[in-house]
Image (tube, rainbow, N blue to C red):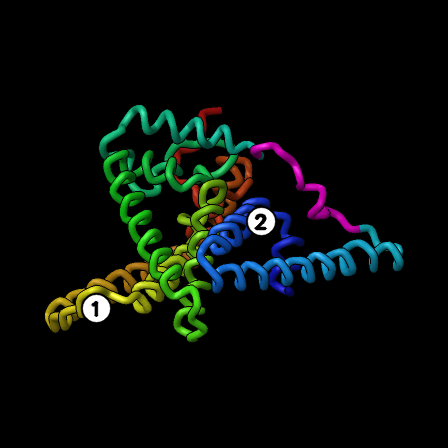
Amino acid sequence: SLWWMIAISGGTRGTWLGMAAAVAVTFCLGRAGRRWAGWQLGAASTGLLLFSLLFSVLPSLLGIEVSNFAGDRLTTSLSAREILWQQAWEMIKQRPLLGFGPMHFADIWNAVAAHPHQAILQWACEWGIPSTLCVAGLALYGLSTTAVLLRKRAQSLEPVDLMRLCLFASLIGALTQSMVDGVIVMPYSQLWLAIIVGWLLALHEWQAAPRPASVALSRAWLLCLTLATGMILYTIVRDLPDMDTRRQQFSEDFGGRYLPRFWMQGVIAQPPAR
């Protein structure tokens, strides 16, 4: 209920859409899914009540004015996303096969955001249409396979089956929100996507027993992960001392409105001509 209250007070319409999609999909997955959907509806109702008490009733009684109220953001506008989506579409038309390269949406300046707030458009404009179709196909295959397994185990109350249902619902919610938000872009949500997908793979019932992992391959993966982590740490150590200078320079070049990615300022484009 507290998490629902936070989600409501945040005023992010994409989060509400994602949770609604997760509830709708799980409701169709048998008894366990309907039970989970019922829990979420009950928790959402309690969260809405808590939100009303803390952000509406109580401030009114105490004479406190609430600014940026979540209810004020219940609009049907795209919040300038149409500008981002148009830019992504133009990039796709220019380079449909291989795209512009990872993170290169941020290499074309716009005054709205450093990513298009739409997972499919972003992948297509940065990696190309063939890569997008491959990734979408893998995602649909994984989701459909998990959904079939959930329906098969719909009567089970085993903890592993309940956990699988919760992880699946989380993934449905995240993927739905990624259609209007930067879920696949921001490092925090990227980390959670990796955890959820990995957890689901670990819980999956494979038709054939997986072969023992090669020691050499495991060590190679470990080496790659170590090198990648080292590169990130090197980047942080290299850039962190100059962050104030970089922010000041960004303010002079772009006007000071931060468009976050890995750093608070996520733009890699050249300053627009003045």
Front residue (pair 55, 147):
147
Element type at marker 2?
Answer: helix
The kind of residue on which mark 1 rests is: Leu
* 127 versus 64 height, above or below: above
Q: Residue furthest bottom?
A: 158
- Label number found at residue 222: 1
Look at the image and tell me in which quarter the N terminus lies: bottom right
The kind of residue on which mark 2 rests is: Trp
Residue plotted at (67% across, 40% down): 74
Q: In this picture, which residue range is highlighted in magenta?
A: 66-78
Task: Give the mark, 1 or 2, whose residue is nearer the N terminus.
Answer: 2
Tell me how far mark 1 sits from mark 2, CA to CA: 38 Å
Front residue (pair 32, 173):
32
Side of 128 relative to 111 (left or right): left
Mark 2 crowd level (few <14, some 14–19, many ≥20, 10 Å Cα)? some
Q: For residue 126, what is the image quadrant?
A: top left
* Residue 260 in picture, x, y percent from top left: 48, 47
- Label number found at residue 16: 2
Residue plotted at (44% across, 56% down): 29
Numbered-mark total = 2
